[in-house]
Amino acid sequence: MKAIPKPKRVAPERIDGRQKVLGAVRFTTDFSLPGMVHAKILRSPVPHARIKSIDASRARSLRGVLAVVTGADIATMPDPFYGVGIRDQPVLAIDKVRYVGDMVAAVVAEDEATAFRALELIDVEYAELPALMTIADALSEGAPDIFEKPSSGVSLPVGAGAQSLKEPSRNVLYEFRYARGDIEGAMRQADHVFTDTFTFSRIHHYHLEPYVNVARADAESIEIWSCNQDPFILRNDLSRMFGFPLHNVRIHTAMIGGGFGAKSYCKMEPLVVFLARQVRRPVRLCLTMDEAFLTLSKHAAILTLKTAVTAKGRLIAREADIKLDGGAYSDASVSTTIKTGYRITGPYKWDAVSTAASAVRTNTVPGGSFRGFGGTQASFASESQMDMIARRLGLDPLEFRCTNMLAPGEPYAPGDSALDSDFEAGLSKAAHLIGYGASPKKRGRGIGLSVGLKDGGGTGNQALAEIKVSDAGEIMVRAAAVEVGQGVGTVLGTIAAEILDRPMTAVRYGEIDTDHTPLDTGTHVSFATAVTGRAIEQAAIDVRNQILDFAAERLGCDRAELLLSGWKILRGNQSFPLQKMLREYYGPVGTEFIGRGRMKILYDAAAPLGSQNYFWMPCWSAAEVDVDEATGKVTVLKLVVGADAGRALNLPACHGQLEGAALQAFGQSLFEELAYDGPAPVNADPMTYRVPLVTDLPGEFESFIEEQGMGPGPGGAKGLGEAGMLGIAAAIANAVEDAVGARVLQLPITPERVLAALRARQGDAQAAP
Amino acid sequence: MQIELAVTVNGQQKRLSVATNRTVADLLREDLNLTGCRVACDGEVCGSCTILIDGLPAAACATFAFEVDGSFLETIEGLAENDVLHAIQQAFLETNAFQCGFCTSGFIMSVKALLTVDPAPTDDTIREWLKSNICRCTGYQTILDATRLAARRIGIPA
C-alpha cells in the first residue's frame, strides 16, 4: 500500500474550530424570530431607464402578500441614500434604474415562495435611456448623465500632495490626484519613457453564505441580525437614514460564512428595516447567489503607466492615469480609487510621481470592497510593467526590482510611514523557492516574479476592546472585529491569553452586539491583528494590573513583588491560587475583571492620505508556467506566495489566509471573470461563473510566512489577510512572457489572449528591420 | 399538496408530512433543525449542502423531499458520537481545513462517502471526488491534507 504523507502542519486548535467541523455554528442564515415573514426583491431587467410607472395592485392582492414597497415609499425616509463617503444609492430605485439588477420593488409575504410569485405580478413600465456599459461609453461625447444631480455626502479627506474631488465631471463619481517632485523635468531627463496600458477584470466574491438579514422594529427601536461585517458603520447608517438615535439601533453579528469584502458597508439592510416597520413583523431577506452577483463586484480598471528610467535601469518617475469602473453606485469606490492611485508606485524609489485615478460611473454592477482593493489593480499593472521594462532594457527582472526597491525604514512617500518589511528579502526567497535562474530554460516554460504592495490597517481607523475575565481565569474577548473565517477570535484570544498566562481553552470570543460590544471602524484592510490586537493587549494588561493590585493589597506588599502565572500569584517562592484569594474576598459568586483598551491610527495632514499608513503589506509572488503555443493554454506548474506576518500569532491561519487569497487571484488571472456582453452580465449565476476547484490547483502550491517583527501590532505583528491577492496575476503574466515572449496586458490570461499576444510578437518580429 | 414520508435521519426513523415543492434541504433545516446542511448556491453547484442519501453524496438543495421516502439520510450532525468528533471531523480540525466553515459540512460529508467507497484513495481520486465542493476560503490544500490524514487514521484497524 502506498504510504500517505503526513500533513504538513499540525495546527493549534482554533476556538471556533469544533463548532465548525460539527456543523454547529449558527450563521445569520440559521436565525429566525417568531412571526417572521419573508421579503424578495424585484430587479431591473434594463440597464438604464426612467421608471414611468409601477403597478403593484395584482401583487398586493395575492393571498399571503403583506406589502409591496417601491421607490415612492422609500423616498419618504429621512434619508433614503447610502454609500461610503459619497451617498448616491437609494434603498430602492427612485424614478430611475441604473443597471440590470438595480432594486426596483420589494415584496413581503408569509413565505418566500409567495413573495417570489408576487414579484411576477408587479408591472413596471420603463422608458429606456442609452446604456453606458463601459468606461469609454460613460466618458464619450454626448453620453447621458447617469446621475442628473450632485449626490449627497463628501469625498474623503486626504493630506499633503493629494486632492480628493467629488463628482468632478459627467459620469465621474470621484477623482484622486497625487503628485510629488518635478514630473516634467524627470520625464525630460530620462533615457527611456515607457507607456503601457493594462486592463484589470471584474470578478465577484462568490461568498458561500448568502447575503442575509433579519430585522424587527417598533416606533422607538430598530434591531437587525445581519451578515454585515461592519456593525458600527451599519448602526450609523441606519440611525441617519431612519432618524433614530444611535442607541435605539441594535446590530447583532454572528459568524460570517465568507465575505471577501462583499459584506462590508451598508447594502440591503435599510430595506429590511423599512419592510419590518411597514408590516410590523420581523422580516427576513435572504438573497440568492444570483442576486449576490448583481450586488457587488471587484472594480474592473484600465491603468496607463508612463514610467521614466535611466539607461542603467534606475527608476526616475511615474505618471499614472487610472480609471476604475465604479458601476452604477458609489459603494466603496471612493476609497478604492484613492488606494489604487496611491499604491501605483509600488515599493520603489522615485524622484517624481503624478497619478490621477478616477471612478467612472457605468450602467453595471457597483464596484466595491474586494480583498486588497486598489492594491490588486495597482500591483497587477505596476508589476507587469516592471518586468516589461527590465526585458526591454535587457536587465534581469529580479535585479531591476531590487536595485530600485525601498529598504525597510525608508518612507513609502514623503510624509508617510517607513516600510516595515524587508521587501527584497522576501522577493529573494520567492525567487529561490521557484528556482529562479537555477536551471536552463526549457522551451515553452517560464518563470515570473512580482512583489505586490498594499497599505494595511486603514486610514485613521480605530478599535476599542474589552476583556471580561472570570475569577476562574476564563477570558471573554469583546471586540467588533467580525469572524469572517480569518480566525480573528483566535488571534485576539491568543494576545489576551499570553498576557494573562492562560491556555486557549480558557478563551471565548463574544458574539457581536452593538449594545454591548466596543466599537470599531469595521472589519477591513487586514486590520484586526494589528489595530484591534493593540486594544486587546491594553485590555489584558489592564486586567493583569487589576489582579496584581488586588493581590498586593490582600498580601500587604508592593505590586512589583508579584507575578501572575498559571492563575496563581507568585511572590518569591510562595504561590497563592488566585481563585481562592478572590472567593475569600468576594464570596461564592466570585468576581470578574473588566479590562479596556483603545487604539486609534492618528490623523496627520502631512501624510498624503491624511494619516500615516499603519503598516505595509508585501505579497511576494512567483509562478512557473508552461505555455502551449499551439492552443495558447497556460498551465501553472508551480505557484509560490509569501507574506510578512511581522509575528505570526497563528501560523496555520496565516498560511490559510495567504493560500486562500492567492487561489482567488489565481482564478482571476486565468479564467474567472464576471463578463458583460451587452446590457447584462452573461455569467451572473453560480453555474456559469467559474471559480477555482480543487482540480484547478497549480501543480505545486507553496506559501511562506516571514516573521520580520517590524509591524506595529503586538510583538511586531501585522495583518496579511489581503496580501495573497496582490501579486499573483502579475507573476503569472510575467511568467507567460518569460516562457514564450508574449505579453498579455489584460486579465484573465485566456488562451485567446495568449494567442493574440503570440501573433503580435510575430508581427513585431516581421516588422523589425 | 402534502405527502407522508418515512425516512431515517442519522439513525432515527422519522415519519413526516411535507409539501411536494419542498427540498431535502428545507426538510432538514426547517423541519428538523439540522442547520449544518448549508445552502449556498441553491443550484447543485457548490456542494455546501452535501448530505448522504443511502450512503451516496447528494445536493440537498436540489433533491425534492418526496424523492427520499424510504431512504437513509446522513448529515454532519450525525457524525460525532457522544461529543467525540468523527475521525474526519478531527482531521479537518487538526489541519485547519476550514476558515469561515460554510462549506465544511459538505466537504466532510463528501469525504465520508469517498472513504466508504475507497478507504485508501490516491490524490487524483480525492481531487475527483472533492471537485464537487467549492471552498472559497482555504485554497484547498488543507482540505487535501485533512482527507489524507482521515484516510490514514480510518485505514488503521483499531
Image (spheres, coloured by chain):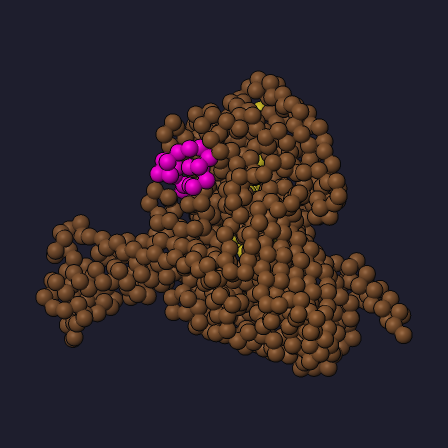
Residue closer to the observer: A355 or A295: A355
Image: B95 above or below A69: below
Q: Residue at x 66, y 43 (%)?
A: A171
Q: Quadrant of the C terminus of chain A?
A: bottom right
Chain B, hue in figure: yellow
Chain A, hue in figure: brown
Image: A566 above or below A101: below
State the image coordinates of residue A347 (x, y, percent, origin top left): 57, 69
| Magenta-drawn segment | A235-253
Q: Residue at x 69, y 74 (%)?
A: A189
Q: Residue at x 54, y 71 (%)?
A: A704
Q: Is residue A750 magenta?
A: no
Choose top left, top right, bottom left or bottom right for residue A33.
top left
State the image coordinates of residue A548 (x, y, percent, origin top left): 19, 64
Most distant residue in the left direction: A556
State the image coordinates of residue A158 (x, y, percent, origin top left): 51, 55
Image: A148 above or below A302: above
Q: Is residue B142 visible?
A: no
Q: Residue at x 57, y 46 (%)?
A: A166
Residue closer to the observer: A674 or B103: A674
Is A294 left, or right, of A736 in this rendering?
left
State the image coordinates of residue A486 (x, y, percent, origin top left): 48, 57
Choose top left, top right, bottom left or bottom right for residue A601.
bottom left
The mark total stands at: 0
Q: Is residue A603 visible?
A: yes
Is B49 left, or right, of B128 in this rendering?
left
Q: Is residue A238 magenta?
A: yes
Image: A401 above or below B109: below
Q: Quadrant of the N terminus of chain A?
A: bottom right
Choose top left, top right, bottom left or bottom right for residue A309.
bottom right
Residue closer to the observer: A343 or A67: A343
